[in-house]
Image (cartoon, rainbow, N blue to C red):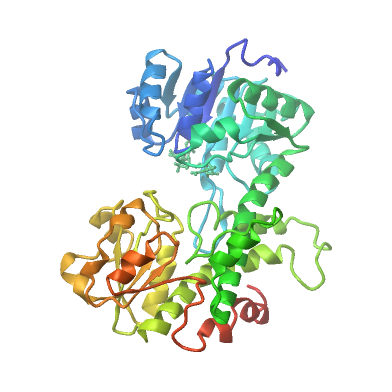
Amino acid sequence: MQSNSSDFHQSSPTVAVIGLGKIGLPLAVQYAQHGYRVIGCDINLKVVEMLNAGQSHVQEEPELDADIARLVEEGLLWATVHTDEAVRLSEVVVVIVPVVVDAQHRVNYRAIDAATETIAAGLQPGTLVVYETTFPVGTTSSRLRHILEHTSNLQAGKDFYLAYSPERVSSGSIFRDLRIYPKVVGGIDEQSTAAAIAFYRSVLEADIIPMKSTDEAEFVKLIETTYRDVNIALANEYACFADAHGLDVSAAIAAANTQPYSHIHMPGVGVGGHCIPVYPYFLLASVEKADPQVTLSELPLLALPRFARRINDAMADYAVQRIEAIAGSLAQQSVLILGVAYRGDVHEAAFTSAKLLRDALFKHGATVYVDDPLFSQSELRALGYTPLLPEFEGEIDAIILQAGHQAYQAFDFGRFARCQVILDGRRALNSERIESAGIRYITIGDGYREKPAQECHKQPVISSMLQSGGE
Ligand SMILES: NC(=O)c1ccc[n+]([C@@H]2O[C@H](COP(=O)([O-])OP(=O)(O)OC[C@H]3O[C@@H](n4cnc5c(N)ncnc54)[C@H](O)[C@@H]3O)[C@@H](O)[C@H]2O)c1
């Protein structure tokens, strides 16, 4: 191959970044700041035009505005909707176009397939192609390799380098994370791994961890994200246990975590976002291709992540049961959900637990209002919620905090004259402030009970799942 894999920086080649979203745009800036000429590629014309005008469309990383203006001015960064042409001009292609799941949790590859077709149309011999999107295991080495080879008439490993490196950063702290999180890199062969490592060495200060294959590198990201989902599910189980025994789970977990091998997360009203509740399904999607002989006794492969997903999604229903244990049946009562974002202080509602809470409340006959200072009223309506208007404040019987936005620290709970109980689903509120307003303050797993037994104890979530076969 033409490209010298150990010499990316000196020859100052061009890098194409495919997908200029919340992650791709900062990556394009990172590479340009390290002396590369970077062409950002996106199908969204507005994103492309903004970049070429020196502007960022990503609010989460405020430093982007000044950096993009300077790099565009210096001629190191520009953008296009013509991915094939950009790839033709580039020695390195980094792909960060999303793969998502649908409502039935089936993996949807449409965007990455389309991006790969266009990359293949411009692919030149000697190019390094690295995927960074989170994938089911085997996606790079079979599905995408096939599209690249078939459309370009080039052979991976012989004519071009092909690698995978999961993007592990979090939106909001990307440049910090790029500095400190080790970069996991695996190629389809040794040369591809070496080429990808050489590229990342020239743009990152962080350590690099080579993996044996793209499959293994894909597996890493699914392990670290699914770990968090399973860990939270365990914390949620502990919370139900604590409620059943009148114990405070947060004090118990904090004490347990002083032992260096215990790292239990905190329980809550559910797990949201486009990563943690989604990637376990990527792992499960990879099971189809696994050796069917490999099972653990009678249990299906990856039984724990399957159950964890169900436990975390069941927490919305559990939250409603806890409120009913204090406020009585919610039929004909009004409940306010604070925060529709999937977590505190983000303007994003992907796979938010607010939706599960709303549906659980509806199932119990409640009228449901929402509040979220980061979303406009029309945005809330478009997401299917009823925003709380001041004239309905007096109707609210119970409140659930779903997203711990900073703004809720100064929220005036005194205005909800009829409210009996606040369930703080993220342990983010000041209990004294709420109780001084005459409202009962509870959390998931605080062990508080007005009645001797709750539904959760009679029918533990996990045992009912085992009875129903775990699906
Ligand atoms: N958002 C996060 O916090 C995060 C963290 C770590 C890793 N990731 C990974 O990064 C991926 C991208 O996340 P994001 O937050 O940047 O997504 P995003 O939705 O903000 O951006 C994706 C971009 O890809 C563009 N795109 C779609 N199809 C395309 C195509 N065919 N060609 C070119 N561009 C195309 C879209 O127009 C959009 O601008 C995720 O799927 C995930 O695997 C995300």
Foreground pick, 274 / 250: 250
Is residue 263 found left or right of 173 in the rendered image?
right
Quadrant, the N terminus: top right
Question: Residue 215: x, y in percent?
Answer: 72, 43
Asked whether residue 96 appears in the rendered view, the answer is yes
- In this picture, is 349 found above or below 8? below
**In front: 448, or 403?**
448
* Quarter occupied by residue 61: top left
The quadrant holding residue 432 is bottom left
Q: Is residue 342 left or right of residue 262?
A: left
Q: Position of residue 321 (x, y in %)?
A: 45, 80
Q: Is residue 311 above or below residue 82?
A: below
Task: Residue at 68%, 57% (x, y): give it.
Answer: 262
Quarter of the view holding residue 57: top left
> In this view, which residue lies farthest toward the bottom?
452
1 on left or right of 48: right
User: In x, y percent, where is residue 346?
Assistant: 39, 48
Q: Residue 170's spot in the image, x, y percent?
A: 51, 42
User: Residue at coordinates 62% horizontally, 61% vertically from top-left?
Assistant: 255
Q: What residue is at 37 percent from the left and 26 percent from the top? A: 51
**Nearer the observer, 114 or 25:** 25
Q: Is residue 389 left or right of residue 384?
A: left
- Tag count: 0
Viewport quadrant of the C terminus: bottom right
Which residue is farthest top? 11
Which residue is the extreme one toward the left?
391
Q: Is residue 337 visible?
A: no
Residue drawn at point x = 54 percent, y = 39 percent: 169
